[in-house]
Each structure stands twice: as C-alpha cells, then as structure tokens.
Image (cartoon, grey):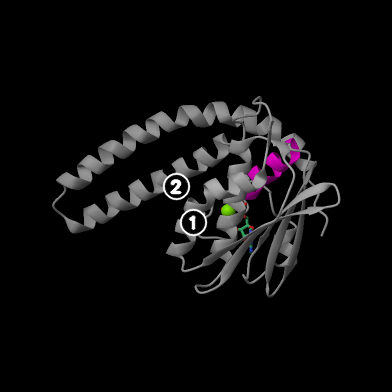
Amino acid sequence: IEYDITRIDRMNLIAEMAAGIAHEIRNPLTTVKGFLQMLGWKSDLQQYQDYYQLMINELERANCIITEFLSLTKNQTEDLELQNLNTIIQTLSPLIHADALQSEITIVEELGEITDISLNEKEVRQLILNLVRNGIEAMEAGKDLKVKTYMDSDEVVLAIIDQGKGIEPEVLAKLGVPFFTTKEAGTGLGLMICKNIIKRHNAKMDIVTSSKGTTFYIRFPV
Ligand code: ADP
Ligand code: MG
C-alpha cells in the first residue's frame, strides 16, 4: 500500500501552535502531580490512596501526550548529517532489546551493507523506536520482530517486520491521524510523528499487512 503523507503539511501548522501551549500546560501538571503524591502518602484510607494513584496516573498520561506532541516540532531546524542508518540502529539496540524483553519478544537485526544518507539522528532514532514499539505492542509473547536494512537500487530501505495480527483496512486508513489509537493506553501520536520525520527526510513509507503480520518499509533517498 502506497502511503499518502501530504496531510502532514496542515498538521505542521497546528502542531507548532499546540507546542507552545503544551509546554505551558506541563508546569501546572507537574505541580498538581507533586501535591497529589504528597496527599496520597498522608492519607490513611486505602480507598483514598487508590483515588490519588488514579489521578496521578491520569496526569502522567496527559504528560505523555504532551511529550509526544512536543517532539513533533523539535529539531525541525537542525541540519541533516551524512550518517549510516546501521550505526543508529546499533546504538539503539540495547534500548530496543530491553523493550522487547519485557514483552518476551525477540529482536532480530539484519543489517545489510548500506550507503550513508543525510539524516537527523534524533529524529531517525525516534522513528525507529516508534515503529519498533508499535510492532512489539502488536505481537504476542514468543514472537520475533525483525529490523532490517538493505539497498534497493538508489534507496536505503529500513524494514520493521512484525508477526502481529495485522492492520484492518479501517485502521489502516486512519494511521497517522492525530490521537487515533486502538490501544487502551495509546496516545495515537506515534505514527503521526513518524510520518512527519519521514517527510522531512524526503523518504517514503509503505505498509504491507496481512493476518500474519505487518511490515513498515521506510525508503530513504541516497
Ligand atoms: P499508538 O501506538 O499510541 O496507538 P500510533 O500512532 O503509534 O499510536 O499507532 C496508531 C494505531 O495504529 C495503533 O493504535 C494500532 O492500532 C495501529 N498500528 C500501528 N502499528 C501497528 C502494527 N505494527 N501492527 C498492528 N497495528 C498497528
Ligand atoms: Mg505507537
């Protein structure tokens, strides 16, 4: 399936405005969270402690949404640097393996010989992490998630191959729409951020999905 990322143009403007507000919302959230924690410690009633914990969790969720939203507008003016995608994957490797281990997923790295491309390291790290995390979250324990790189004519290809349950057509149509999520604790911002990063690198995203799993292909121009 060929993916359309033009919608991100409009999103850029909205995200920039939202980033300013999001940043300001964080400070009061942190203050409230701190005092709730304190009250929770002081409270003798177990029932109240549960309520406090619930409030703190919800604040953390709000904070999570803001963090992901803010990362949309970050690094936008930073320059691209000639780098190898494999190097970035290798430095991310411990983090990815730790994430996978928690869900009893095995990460298989298949890094081919690829040429350097101009990229923003922070952004590409985020891109890989978001895709890998989605893959892990889509799978049951005991499955493999493959991270693969290779050359395809004049493109460097990153493939994230999961053995999850696949993506239904109605979900596929909404991927990357802000706050669209099918997960109970999802933010629905991961793929929107990915698409934004992909666009800034003049790359392309293709998704191939079936009931046996999903592969996200990211094609970077050399
Ligand atoms: P979140 O992960 O917070 O839900 P994302 O933007 O990362 O937000 O993903 C949006 C939705 O796309 C997910 O809720 C899920 O339904 C679907 N999705 C993304 N990646 C995969 C995948 N590898 N396999 C199955 N579904 C996926
Ligand atoms: Mg996600």
Where is the C terminus found, in terms of image quarters? Answer: top right
Q: Nearer the viewer, residue 72 or 80?
A: 80
Vertical relation: 194 (above or below) 173: above
Q: Where on the picture, by quarter, is residue 87?
A: top right
Q: Where on the picture, by quarter, is residue 18?
A: top right
- Magenta: main secondary structure: helix
Name the residue located 68 percent from the left edge and 75 percent from the top edge: 212
Q: Is residue 94 magenta?
A: no
Vertical relation: 63 (above or below) 129: above
Q: Residue 144: horizontal and vertical position, in percent? A: 57, 69
Q: Residue 190: horizontal and vertical position, in percent? A: 60, 48
Q: Which residue lies furthest to the left in this view?
A: 44
Q: Quadrant of ligand 1?
A: bottom right
Name the residue located 51 percent from the left edge and 55 percent from the top edge: 96
Label 2 vs 1, first from the N-terminus:
2
Which residue, given by chain and number where applicable, does mark 2 sit on? 61
Q: Which amino acid does label 2 sit on?
A: Arg
Q: Specify the segment rendered in magenta.
A: 188-200
Mark 2: few/some/many CA within 10 Å (<14, 14-19, 20+): some
Q: Where on the picture, by quarter, is residue 20?
A: top right
Residue 24 visible? The answer is: yes
**Left or right relative to 214: residue 6:** right
**Left or right relative to 31: residue 214:** right
Mark 1: few/some/many CA within 10 Å (<14, 14-19, 20+): few
* Secondary structure found at label 1: loop
Q: Gap in Å between the C-alphas at discs 2 and 1?
A: 8 Å
Which residue, given by chain and number where applicable, does mark 1 sit on? 185
Q: Residue 211: horizontal and vertical position, in percent? A: 69, 75
Q: Does the residue labelled 1 lie within 8 Å of ligand 1?
A: yes
Q: What residue type is labelled 1?
A: Ala
* Secondary structure found at label 2: helix
